[in-house]
Image: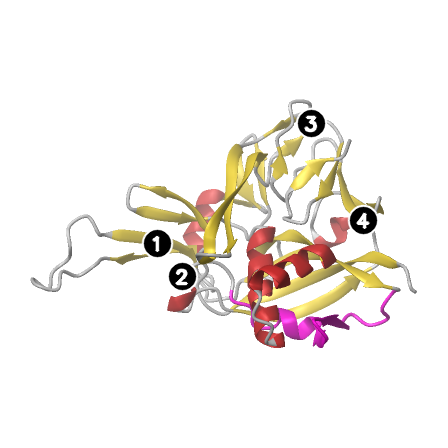
Amino acid sequence: MKEEKWILYSLVFQLKSPLHIGYHKIMHLTRTRLYVPARTLWGAMTVKLVQKTGRNDYKKAGQFLREKMRFGYFYFSNGKELFLPHYTEEGLKLGRMCLYEFEKKYIRSISTTAIDANSLSAEEETLHHLEYINYRNTEDSSPLFLEGLMWIKIDGHPKEDDFLFTYEDVQVKLSELLQSLQIGGERKYGFGETELVKLERLDDTDLRSKGFCGSWLESDESVKVTILQGNFIWAHAKYEPNLNMKGEIEIFMGREWDDKKGSGRNIVTHGLCWMPGSVVEEQATFEITPSGIWEVYK
């Protein structure tokens, strides 16, 4: 029996429709995150795995992916520059752009309201604004991409970038599972359509070649990422009193499958976390958990 090991892959998707990643509400405005958390990609892949195999057990499919994969966060790119958020003395930047410049080029919103059937006018207190990432630069119509990393536990060492794996006695090609994922919220309105444009196996443990800080290694059958002093994290990192960082903290929550209520009905909290872009003030090594959250490796 071949030994299983973690293999790193780089993925690039092109956005084919607007994208909304739920964040929080300010009055009537529902804001979007400026990146795709690991759990969001995991959810989209779970749905696709069920569709591809015809095995209608979302919980089991999701657990299979969590056992076989470790998901990184995905960030927007114009094909030349990766718009990683990071906190600076000048405030939050995405790549080399300030937040305002990024929002000007890529953020839009739509307004919706419920209609009163009797008066055929807007119902009171139903006006709703939804913020979203446009799939093209609003200034020059150039396409927008999502780039990120994913680790997959594989028997041996595949020679090709693509490969087959087996789930519930059904063989699935990795590229076919990743192709045409629908990510994020408002999917019934056509949001979140993506197309896989690049799948590449990486043999280097230094992640800087793909625009990400740090290096990675496999230890105790898990994936560890080391971030040097002065560099920033690119996932949510669970708060620890002895973790010396500066940036922003939030209570990070998400939705999962509920056996009784169905998709997205189970609210899961990951507790207090440092947000992507927060700066490490002392070198730290993190373990990537099955949910994609980073935890300090002790």
Callout 1 crowding tier (Cα within 10 Å): few <14, some 14–19, many ≥20: some
- Tell me the tag on residue 186: 2
- Tell me the tag on residue 107: none
Between discs 1 and 4, the one toward the N terminus: 1
Question: At x 17% / y 61%, what residue is drawn?
Answer: 115
Between discs 3 and 1, the one toward the N terminus: 1
- Tell me the tag on residue 206: 4
Instruction: For marks 1 and 2, give the CA distance.
Output: 10 Å
Was residue 144 drawn as part of the magenta stretch in this picture?
no
Q: Disc 3 marks which amino acid?
A: Glu
Between discs 2 and 4, the one toward the N terminus: 2
The residue mark sitting in front, 1 or 2, is 2
Question: At x 85% / y 59%, what residue is drawn?
Answer: 4
Question: At x 29% / y 41%, what residue is drawn?
Answer: 27
Q: Residue furthest left?
A: 119
Whole-percent x and y of residue 148?
A: 65, 56
246 left or right of 19 in image: right
Q: Quadrant of residue 284?
A: top right
Q: Disc 2 marks which amino acid?
A: Glu
Q: Start and end of the magenta stretch? A: 157-182
Instruction: For marks 3 and 1, give the CA distance.
Output: 36 Å
204 left or right of 12 in image: right
Which is more toward the observer, 25 or 58?
58
Q: Which residue is mark 3?
A: 281
Query: Do the numbered discs 3 and 1 sit on residues whose CB atoms are within 8 Å?
Result: no
The residue mark sitting in front, 2 or 3, is 2
**Quadrant containing the N terminus in the rendered view:** bottom right
Whole-percent x and y of residue 286?
A: 73, 38
Callout 2 crowding tier (Cα within 10 Å): few <14, some 14–19, many ≥20: some
Residue 47 higher or lower than 293, as above or below: below
The residue mark sitting in front, 3 or 1, is 1
Query: Do the numbered discs 1 and 2 sit on residues whose CB atoms are within 8 Å?
Result: yes
